[in-house]
Amino acid sequence: MSNFTHFDSDGRAVMVDVTDKAVTERQATAAARVRMQPETLAAIAEGQIGKGDVLAVARLAGIMAAKRTPDLIPLCHPLALTSVKVDLTLNGAESCVEIAATCKLSGKTGVEMEALTAASVAALTVYDMCKALDKTMQITDLRLIHKSGGKSGEFTQA
Amino acid sequence: MSNFTHFDSDGRAVMVDVTDKAVTERQATAAARVRMQPETLAAIAEGQIGKGDVLAVARLAGIMAAKRTPDLIPLCHPLALTSVKVDLTLNGAESCVEIAATCKLSGKTGVEMEALTAASVAALTVYDMCKALDKTMQITDLRLIHKSGGKSGEFTQA
Amino acid sequence: MSNFTHFDSDGRAVMVDVTDKAVTERQATAAARVRMQPETLAAIAEGQIGKGDVLAVARLAGIMAAKRTPDLIPLCHPLALTSVKVDLTLNGAESCVEIAATCKLSGKTGVEMEALTAASVAALTVYDMCKALDKTMQITDLRLIHKSGGKSGEFTQA
Amino acid sequence: MSNFTHFDSDGRAVMVDVTDKAVTERQATAAARVRMQPETLAAIAEGQIGKGDVLAVARLAGIMAAKRTPDLIPLCHPLALTSVKVDLTLNGAESCVEIAATCKLSGKTGVEMEALTAASVAALTVYDMCKALDKTMQITDLRLIHKSGGKSGEFTQA
Amino acid sequence: MSNFTHFDSDGRAVMVDVTDKAVTERQATAAARVRMQPETLAAIAEGQIGKGDVLAVARLAGIMAAKRTPDLIPLCHPLALTSVKVDLTLNGAESCVEIAATCKLSGKTGVEMEALTAASVAALTVYDMCKALDKTMQITDLRLIHKSGGKSGEFTQA
Amino acid sequence: MSNFTHFDSDGRAVMVDVTDKAVTERQATAAARVRMQPETLAAIAEGQIGKGDVLAVARLAGIMAAKRTPDLIPLCHPLALTSVKVDLTLNGAESCVEIAATCKLSGKTGVEMEALTAASVAALTVYDMCKALDKTMQITDLRLIHKSGGKSGEFTQA
């Protein structure tokens, strides 16, 4: 049971005690893709320049969801995020919406889960708004792409 | 702008009016995978038979998240779900946790988003509990695999 | 203490018992204005056609707030709204943003508070986004303009 | 698009990055009025000395709403408020309930929106409790009346 | 594992499937006591007739908490309660505050947990408001005292 | 009206102003019991070693509830808890489940209410999962057993 930080030595779930951790500036970026039919992507693109901006709705949903992370993920600490940014772009070549979410905090614990939750809910919102057009969409590749601050130092992956 | 149900004719976001839709029995199942290092999967497996059941925590988080769907997805209707079930299983061959979430409702609108949100938050919770072991995890293949009830009829995909 | 429906005969706050009321189709529309400097209104107008649509953000906030009404207004019943629509328009002549919010329900109690809460939070969101430009804004004229369904019948005012 | 702090240079909504702002003591007071028929005001007055204190219910609702501000206003930061005070008084001369809400914080961002949200929900709660008596009530004059702390300094208006 | 309704045959937590249950009128009453020093009880009594009504604040907190039950109790169904009533009385003989909470619903599942949650949060609120006076308070005897509606029929205990 | 910290000099409820209080390390532990039939306790024990761990579900519910305290208890401050731990053990001799919840914070106000809320919701969750087996359960002895940090110093009781 060595390495699970969220269980105590008897295997019971705990919110990790961060009382004695240092307050440092922490940042994390998560990314995700919503894969869809080219026609669905085209409809989103058309709405953006015309009427009905799917990506703007999803961006807001992602920002708001970052703030709800401790209500959703049982063992996450309540945090006073100092910045949330969610970007959505259309990738025609791969027929997907690309999502990246970045959260920041001056605090005692990392903000990966906040960034991942923001990206995840932004993706679900894209799905919700397009589901009448396309039932074959998939949300994929939700992952941490960058993290800095805290004891574990900097981390980057594609 | 033809087919986006969540925008009116001027491109403004709306919660779709379902006042006049029939109350029918509706059901949806969503699935997702959390891909991880084989050592991470092995640690989850060990905890399950020993101390610290990651999947049990994630299952509860998924069930609770289904109920929060209208708080998270801006244009979802508030719904009185009659059943939520979240299954998580270890897939050693593909080194991933497989998640399936099923929601039911007697109501006027479908429950895909509730099932997708449940699967998504269950996946995020697995991620949260394993992230100290493995920063390369990815949440993938979040998709609708079954839906029944309502005007659009039955839908199934792999 | 004759007419307060939210107090019992001893003056204690209660959530009114609607168990025996009929399920009917109910609808309510509320309206509000955010009065501001002409320059502020012009900046919103410019953003709408260019970059940064204040009204789109406020519209979503209003829709989401309608769903949170029972969490905010202590004695409101939890309701499964079937439709929420929030319109915001620029009124140059009176230098204000005009807001109208309409909610619908098939249920046992009216939806005035949901419509008023949606209009109110949409107005607060306009305020939030413009407050760096203009500290003299005022939210005014929040009122019920239409209501139908239920025992008390139809109601309309300007 | 110069001055909107809540949009980036591409017009995308963001939660403003306050990571590098100084922690200072911040305070804001908002005010609002609920205009009503003199008979409605008289009924509230009678309840206060007798049975059924409308203003006490509204005061609590306002205090609780201040804490929910980041859940309601999409781009507000989550804040650990250190004080919330909501006052409601009867103004017979103008036949209205006067509401004032004050919030405090030692933090990196102002608390205007928290004070405005508290005043707004207190006003909506007065409305809710009196709506069976009076459908012509209006919530008006919701505005910032004082603000201190932070870079922009002190602000006062009537 | 015979009788636990909230686990499936593999011991996994589920929200019980009530899709096929009948809609009936359901009601439940829960009760609790907050035991305290006689001086603390006297202070509450004095506030009630004078300034500062602890019981009124606790009553509202209880009513609002009933509505939050599905957010708090993991496997509870979301319900559209039709009535919530919370009574608090001073019992000088036993030096305690007596709390009773009654919830009603026309629905597919019982409302015991809503009544128990309302009584529990009302008790916690009494505790919160008196804790500066008395650290020895205890919340006791939280129990179901009456339940009707649904398949299991009527239940009463002291 | 001397000593109620949550009322001002006019008897109006307030969230106490802690702006000027010192940030210190604060900790509180609350305890509770769920009394039940010996057969009910035996069923929980059997599930723990077999299928269906009631205590694991209740533990998570308690941890999550600690984070919701400011949403539930009207005058509690929003806090960024740094640690939450909930223990549940079976007491065969007294035929009850024993619950202890500990919360920590570096902050300006104590965390008793967070610990009491965690213990309370963990107890309610045990109740919920066992209520089909036993309607005579009682939640009792919810009390503060330890508190440290802050001006009032250390406190311990059985």
Image: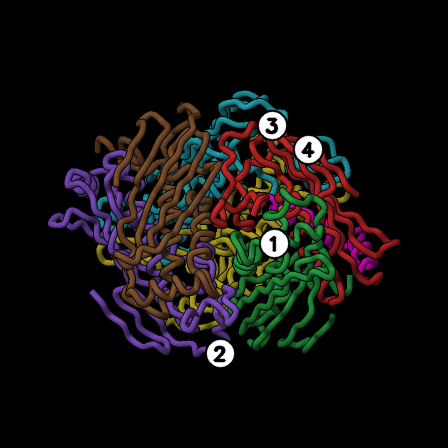
Chain colours: A cyan, B yellow, C purple, D brown, E green, F red
Q: Amino acid at mark 4?
A: Ser
Identified by mark 2, the residue type is Asp
The x, y position of residue A148, in whole percent, is 50, 23
Kindly identify which numbered label has been placed on residue F148. 4
Q: Amino acid at mark 1?
A: Ile
Quadrant position of the N terminus of chain B in the picture: bottom left
The amino acid pointed to by label 3 is: Thr
The residue carrying pointer 2 sits among few (fewer than 14), some (14 to 19) or many (20 or more) residues within 10 Å by Cα, namely few
Numbered disc 2: secondary structure: loop
Is residue A13 toward the left or the right of residue E65 in the image?
right
Question: Magenta span covers which residues?
Answer: F40-66
- Residue A9 in percent (x, y) is at 76, 35
Residue of label 3: F24
Q: Which residue is mark 2?
A: C20
Q: Nearer the viewer, mark 3 or mark 2?
A: 3
How far from the left and from the top, in percent, is residue F16? 51, 40
Find disc 1 in the rendering and name its residue.
E44
Magenta stretch containing residue C116, yes or no? no
